[in-house]
Image (cartoon, helix red, strand yellow):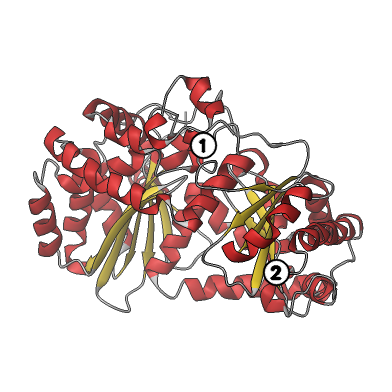
Amino acid sequence: MKKTSIVSRITILFVVFIATFTLAAQETSVENAYNYKLDNGLELFVMENHTVPLTYIEIAVRAGGIGQDVENAGLFHLYEHMMFKGNSQYPTAAAFQKGLKSLGVSGWNGSTSSECVHYFFKIPSDLTEKGLEFWSSAIRNPLLDSKELENEKKVVISEISGGYGDPGTILGNAIAKLLFPKFPWRLDPAGPVKNVENATVKQLREIQQKYYVPNNAALFVGGDVNHEEVYKMVKKIYGDWPKANDPWTKDREYQSETPFKQTKYMVMPYSKLSSDLGEVLVLYRGPDTVTDIESTYAADILGNISANPNGIVKQSIINNSELGVPSPDYVSSINFYTQRESGQISFNAILTSPEQSLAERALYLEQTFQGIVKQIANNPNYFKSEEYKIVKQQLKDSDVYARETSSGFLSGLRASWISASGDYYFNYNDKMNNVTAEDVASYAKKYLEDKPALVVVLVNPDIYEVQKESFKEAGFTTITQENAYWWKDSMYVKKVGINYSEQGANDD
């Protein structure tokens, strides 16, 4: 056997040590951006930007509405509130606030959405390690005191009740219930008041133990920092956070890809809308990143290419005098909202003179839009090759602009991590650059052409009263405060055996 010299062996050991350390940071496609993953599954993304002596720290969890069932809908939002009410390091809400003040926090917040719960702040960069310790205590060791819980319930219930009659909230809930009828509560982070009233510390602990775990979380740190030093800090502070079971099991049921067999027509008296205008929304079920991530790239290209005010999509709408759409500013693109489990496509236009046969014009708009869709789906040359080049360059330029600040870059990265992964963000431009006209046509054929839509007309209440019968005769159902919320629908009440009668169960 060949002998190895001592010098050679030392060299080999040194190279192995360097390689091991270097591999801890995964290369990314973005200059000064680094990606690490701890042994417990916690992901760390670092962006160096030494322009100002500040550090942005954000911690995100894949949770929120997506983790809800009927009984705990709304409790992720309540849990978000309780994280600010004391932990092992700062045992009271007052101590928590004092801790923030001692860090010189220039801005902080937390929010709960359908697929994410996240918390963030900016601090002086020389306090980066203390900032990481602050969020470690908050996310790993919340006290969840029963007395604080009862007090915070009142705050959360006030928030829910305050928005209950808001037209935008009613509309959003109605769309979620109609477009995602299988699990509408997964798109309702607020949930019903009764769930919040009945919430227990035990339920919140169950949420913590299942979802607030390192292998379901990510840290985003940016600003006047060194990525290797941040990694060392994070490993020291978060490295002993115990890994748990993956909350997203393979046998998980997803939302239906075909929520209804025929197009649904809805109308809503909308007090925020002028009596001079009416708005028509045409919505479809879109691809989810968990089941069809490749289609999301073509969806984004179509969304951007159809946004051109002088392009064929918008011009086809405004040049149709029967619709009464005055300019490209009154027509949306064919938007796609990227989500893990609730992707949706939307198109909307604002019509003038809503007092003139609005129901019939709304039906005609949908037909006109389907005509456009058919051309996109069956004619790869519908958009010019130059348009594709321009859109792809615009997306790259937009990405560069977003990277001017570490917080802007990291918030965008976090959105991608939540909906898919960090790689989704870092590979995005390359994927978009490879999208072809045939890909866009295939996407339109798969998700839009001849697919049942949800058509919603928004109209000023005074105009609605005059045209109410016309809408009814045209097959429209009216969206109201009473039928918009899933927890007021008898179908769900009977299905799970829960009675929300004090909030007005509805038999529609």
The reply, left or right, for residue 203 in relation to residue 295 is left
Query: Which residue is found at the position 26% from the left and 58% from the top?
Result: 229
Instruction: Kindly state the secondary structure of the residue where label 1 is placed.
Output: helix
Image mark for residue 486: 1
Marks 2 and 1 in Cβ contact (< 8 Å): no
Task: Estimate how packed mark 1 is, as few (under 14), some (14 to 19) or many (20 or more) residues with alpha carbons within 10 Å.
Answer: many
- Residue 368: percent from the left, percent from the top? 84, 62
Reading the image, the residue beneath label 2 is 354
Alpha-carbon span between mark 2 and mark 1: 30 Å
Q: Which three-letter amino acid code belongs to the residue tagged 2?
A: Pro
Q: Which badge, 2 or 1, is on the more N-terminal residue?
A: 2
**Vertically, is 357 above or below 43?**
below
Instruction: Kindly state the secondary structure of the residue where label 2 is placed.
Output: loop
Q: Which three-letter amino acid code belongs to the residue tagged 1?
A: Trp
Q: Is residue 236 visible?
A: no
**Vertically, is 18 above or below 76?**
below
